[in-house]
């Protein structure tokens, strides 16, 4: 009985030992046939040294050099309109006329009185030389002539004021009146704006006052024309600092020959410094932004080839898709610009021969 049990145990050990041995052999053979994963393919760029011109940023509003609602000084009924909405006009161009029929009739009477006063004065002037009239009569006739002539000039001025003209060159807006409409004194007739040049008003904190000067260059962008820069110069600064905001108000003048900038537009303003500074930059695609800090993967040579290491960096301004590197990198260092998600420290990589994504704009 005991021999039978020992035989069964021996056979079981041999069978299970053979099975485990065969399994171990197959596993080792499979491991020997497995290949290491290929290195990750990444796009790489170099830290570039550039010359950047410092600038101050602000927001402002565009203001017309001259802008009014054309209005009438005297009341009257419109008899004629000589312009169309949106028309460009020159200084002195006739816009509307008010009814002057009564004024013109009164003018004729005043002109007759002035003519009579002129005749009387000339007669008295001859008589005073012969001493046929008193000096007081002569002075009275001269005063009456002056009074009559003044009355004529006053009436001519009234008639002229009922012919409303453009006070300066500019572009008209939408007409607000119609023929036959009675206008009270000071009624709005049509907006008139001078668009070239045009002003932009903005403010800057008082700490920048020492770096500001009349004639300093600046640029403006507006939402209506994204990507288009409008150049100008600072033309005026308020002599006082606003007590509430501790800021200084400035006005710049912009050329606007195409008249595409309009008063009231919101403007992003950049005031340029006269000095340029040297900075280190990378494409913005190379930066990994995290709440605990910004980082990049730096490509380093190793025993097994190229590997990557994560490095914390301090970033600054962003311009045209490139980010200023304040701390953490040196000029010429190679940094991964695409494919960072799949990377970890000491991971082998292979460099894509194409330019970095942020630098492919120049490719044909």
Image (cartoon, helix red, strand yellow):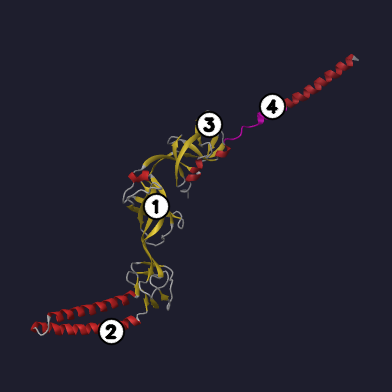
Query: Where in the figure is residue 352, as x and y percent of width and height?
Result: 52, 40
- The secondary structure type at the circle numbered 4 is helix
- The secondary structure type at the circle numbered 1 is strand
Could you tell me how far apart the alpha carbons at marks 2 and 3 are, in whole angstroms? 109 Å
The reply to whether discs 4 and 2 touch (Cβ–Cβ < 8 Å) is no
Neighbourhood count class around disc 3 (C-alpha, 10 Å): few under 14, some 14–19, many 20 upward: few
Q: Which badge, 1 or 4, comes first in the chain's sequence?
A: 4
Q: Which badge, 4 or 3, comes first in the chain's sequence?
A: 4
Could you tell me how far apart the alpha carbons at marks 4 and 2 are, in whole angstroms? 128 Å
Instruction: Give the tally of numbered discs.
Output: 4
- The secondary structure type at the circle numbered 2 is helix
Q: Which residue is mark 1?
A: 202
Q: Which residue is mark 4?
A: 28
Q: Nearer the viewer, mark 2 or mark 1?
A: 2
Q: Is residue 29 magenta?
A: yes
- Residue at 23% of width from left, 80% of height from top? 148
**Which numbered dot is residue 305?**
3
- Residue at 12% of width from left, 80% of height from top? 135
**Which numbered dot is residue 109?**
2
Q: Is residue 331 magenta?
A: no
Q: Which badge, 4 or 2, comes first in the chain's sequence?
A: 4
Neighbourhood count class around disc 2 (C-alpha, 10 Å): few under 14, some 14–19, many 20 upward: few
């Amino acid at each position: 009985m005991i021999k039978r049990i020992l035989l069964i145990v021996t056979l079981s050990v041999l069978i299970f030992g053979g099975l485990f041995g065969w399994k171990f052999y197959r596993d080792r053979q499979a491991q020997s046939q497995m290949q290491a994963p290929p290195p990750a393919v990444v796009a790489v760029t170099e830290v570039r040294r550039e010359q950047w011109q410092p600038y101050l940023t602000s927001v402002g509003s565009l203001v017309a050099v001259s802008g009014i609602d054309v209005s009438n000084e005297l009341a009257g009924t419109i008899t004629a309109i000589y312009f169309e909405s949106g028309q460009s006009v020159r200084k002195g161009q006739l816009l509307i006329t008010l009814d002057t029929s009564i004024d013109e009739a009164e003018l004729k009477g005043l002109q007759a009185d002035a003519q009579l006063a002129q005749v009387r004065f000339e007669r008295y002037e001859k008589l005073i030389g012969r001493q046929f009239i008193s000096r007081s009569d002569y002075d009275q006739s001269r005063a009456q002539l002056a009074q009559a002539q003044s009355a004529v000039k006053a009436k001519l001025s009234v008639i002229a004021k009922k012919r409303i003209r453009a006070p300066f060159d500019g572009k008209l807006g939408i007409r607000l009146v119609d023929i036959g409409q009675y206008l009270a004194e000071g009624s709005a007739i049509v907006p008139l704006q001078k668009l070239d040049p045009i002003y932009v008003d903005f403010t800057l904190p008082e700490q920048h006052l020492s770096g500001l000067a009349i004639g300093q260059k600046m640029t403006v962008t507006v939402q209506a024309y994204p990507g288009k820069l409008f150049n100008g110069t600072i033309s005026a600064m308020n002599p006082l600092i606003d007590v509430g905001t501790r800021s200084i108000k400035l006005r710049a003048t912009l050329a606007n020959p195409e008249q595409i900038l309009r008063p009231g537009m919101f403007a992003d303003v950049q005031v340029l410094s006269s000095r340029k500074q040297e900075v280190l930059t990378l494409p913005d695609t190379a930066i990994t932004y995290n709440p605990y800090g910004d980082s990049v993967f730096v490509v380093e040579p190793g025993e097994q080839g190229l590997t990557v290491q994560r490095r914390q960096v301090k970033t600054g301004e962003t311009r045209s898709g490139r980010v200023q590197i304040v701390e953490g990198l040196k000029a010429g260092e190679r940094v991964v610009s695409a494919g960072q998600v799949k990377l970890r420290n000491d991971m082998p990589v292979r460099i894509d021969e194409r330019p970095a994504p942020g630098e492919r704009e120049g490719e044909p």
